[in-house]
Amino acid sequence: ALGAGVTIENAEGEEALVVDALLGTGSTGSPTGDFAAAISAIASLRAKGAKVVALDLPSGLNATTGSSDGALSADLTISFGTLKRGTLIAREYCGDLEAVDIGLIDDDALSRLPTLIDAKWVAKTVPRIAVDAHKGTRGRLSIVGGGHGMAGAVILSGEGALRSGIGLLRVVAAPANEIAVHAALPAALFSDWPSGPDDLSKLVESSDVIAIGPGLGKSAATRDLVEQILLAWNGPVVLDADALNIFAGDIPSLAKLLKGRQAVITPHPAEMARLVGKTTDDVLSDRFEIGITIAEQLDAAVLLKGTPTIVFSPRGHRYVSASGTAALATGGSGDILTGIVSTLLFQMRASDDAPAEAAACAAFIHGRAAELCGNVRGTTLDDVLRAMPRAWNESPGVAGNGVIASLPIHR
């Protein structure tokens, strides 16, 4: 007996299963006293081979923030009603996650909560490529980026697009990168950055969707280039990396340029912080809400990268992708994602919430491809790209990353 109603009886060290129901969703701070001792005892049993099943969340894990100081690690977490945000942020403590609907929340309340997506949702949402499709119907994507010494960014973005079904790819980059692009992407066309009205007209006429940012560089000239393209082109657009950094603290200007089109921005937390004038820690602590106002102001979907990835729709919807591994925590990963988002933005353009749904599906596939690579150490982005066909075509019943169920996420 450990007091305070906490007991571990007859623990002989050979237990096969331990059910963790010590602390619930209202607990905060590091466990202390008898609870800390109980968590330590369960952890010892797990180290000897016992499987730990946590109810709602592992004891000591903060259900909202994911703070895990002193938390127990579980092999399976059964979450009642909805998944808890903290379990998605601190997935490594949860093992497999399974949400069980026990009728706690009505349909109206569910509609206001973020929705966790899975392979089944992606398969239902992304349109199939028609048997009689050709490169024109699959879409023409132009990727604008690739400043001096940064050809790799547009190459990786192009790979992501080609492996997601784009019909015709054009890379628009600094002239010095032409040979590298042709060598790495023989299926792609190449153009220099536009330098006048004629070049802009050609870019507009040859595109169904434009992605701007991968490896672009950050300078006054860069901002001028981005503004010229967005003023000349009023179709679907994806902005990433330096195409966002140049608008740091200047959301109103970006909003004017994006007005009247389907658009997605794809910041990581530091880019989001620069955009809104906050710290990265501010963004991370408010990751489930911070994009709501930005999406409304820009009238664009906001894909906030991270663990998990949150997509904010200008219509007020929120989508969460919990797929992925630390194999994506490397330079160039976001460039691949930009290519996937751009492809889906065109191919899903008929959807009522196309920018956000395209971004959410892209985030899931990007993460799922990393999961299919297995171990993190030794995995490169080439491996992730090679895994993308499996991610796109595996059984829709596979959720990814041990997250089982497509249920909303509790506030």
Image (spheres, helix red, strand yellow):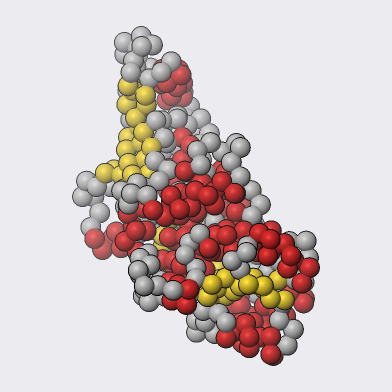
> Where is residue 279 drawn, in percent x and y?
65, 57
| Residue that extends furthest to the bottom in the rendered view of this protein | 197
Whether residue 86 is visible:
no
Front residue (pair 165, 370): 165
> Where is residue 396 drawn, in percent x and y?
32, 52
> Where is residue 362 drawn, in percent x and y?
47, 60
Q: Residue at x 41, y 18 (%)?
A: 49
Q: Is residue 187 left or right of residue 362?
A: right
Q: Is residue 28 left or right of residue 101?
A: right
Is 157 drawn above or below residue 76 in the view shown? below
Quadrant of the image containing the N terminus: top left
Q: Residue at x 55, y 60 (%)?
A: 160
Q: Residue at x 44, y 61 (%)?
A: 360
Q: Residue at x 47, y 31 (%)?
A: 71
Whether residue 15 is visible:
yes
Front residue (pair 361, 244): 361
Front residue (pair 94, 367): 367
